[in-house]
Image: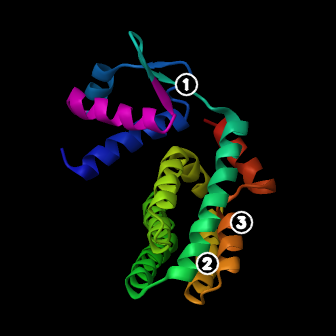
Amino acid sequence: MSENVGRWLRDEIENSILSNEFSPGERLDEMVLATRFGVSRTPVREALMQLDAIGLIEIRPRRGAIVIDPGPHRVYEMFEVMAELEGLAGSLAARRLDKTSRETITATHSRCEQSAAAGDSDAYYYDNEEFHKAIYAAGRSEFLEEQCLQLHRRLRPYRRLQLRVRNRLSTSFSEHCAIVDAIFAGNGDEARRLLRTHVGIQGERFSDLVASMAAR
């Protein structure tokens, strides 16, 4: 099965959880999911393992995959830590930027512009993911990159929810523009500040996220 189909399957199961079609405490049966999505049990099992890795479900002995809900407070704490890690990554990227990293950031930024203009939140999510990965790599700190990627994966469902809030796509891309300008100008302090604000969720943005979670 291709990587794109595997990602599609994972996203479909994830969307069903986020929309509350699969509710907290519910057991996800591999055979039922395989029949529903027209695939074998193997890709379903792989998708469930990925969702277990980010904490959206929990695979328990003799019970299988169970949907869990970390709750808004836990999600908020993860975003707090993510904001600090991203800020550091942006600061290092501004200090250590080379030609290759600059080109990669520029290319991923352009793809974000296209998906934002199209109003496609799912496409923007994946383009946005590559944009942030380019920043991590530009900082040339393997350990920091590993930590950012790990937490980025844990927050994937909630970052996707955020992007569905009205006007968030255009706002997010505008923030990207300022971040790129700061990194390319070599302004580490400004890049850190902008990325912390971009990733962190406070005030209305946190309220919007909680409302989205409650509407599942």
Q: Residue at x 41, y 12 (%)?
A: 63
Q: Is residue 117 magenta?
A: no
Mark 1 and mark 3: Cα distance apart in space: 31 Å
The picture places residue 188, in percent across and down from the top left corner, at: 64, 79
Name the image quarter holding the N terminus.
Answer: top left
Q: Residue at x 51, y 67 (%)?
A: 119
Q: Is residue 156 above or below residue 175?
A: above
Q: Which secondary structure type mostly characterizes the magenta part of the structure?
A: helix
Count neighbours of disc 3 (C-alpha within 10 A) and say few if under 14, some if 14 to 19, many if 20 or more.
Answer: some
Tell me the residue that label 1 is attached to.
23
Name the image quarter holding the C terminus.
Answer: top right
Mark 2 vs 3, N-terminal side: 2
Count neighbours of disc 1 (C-alpha within 10 A) and say few if under 14, some if 14 to 19, many if 20 or more.
Answer: some
Circle 1 — which element?
A: loop
Mark 2 vs 1, N-terminal side: 1
The picture places residue 176, in percent across and down from the top left corner, at: 58, 75
Tell me the residue that label 3 is attached to.
197
Q: Is residue 51 magenta?
A: yes
Tell me the residue that label 2 is attached to.
179
Whether residues under marks 1 and 3 lie with C-beta atoms below 8 angstroms apart, the answer is no
The part of the chain drawn in magenta is 38-58
Residue 130 appears left or right of 45? right
Residue 12 lies in what quarter of the image? top left
Which amino acid lies under the numbered mark 3 shown in the image of this protein?
Thr
Total count of labels: 3
The picture places residue 30, in percent across and down from the top left corner, at: 31, 22
Whether residues under marks 2 and 3 lie with C-beta atoms below 8 angstroms apart, the answer is no
Which amino acid lies under the numbered mark 1 shown in the image of this protein?
Ser
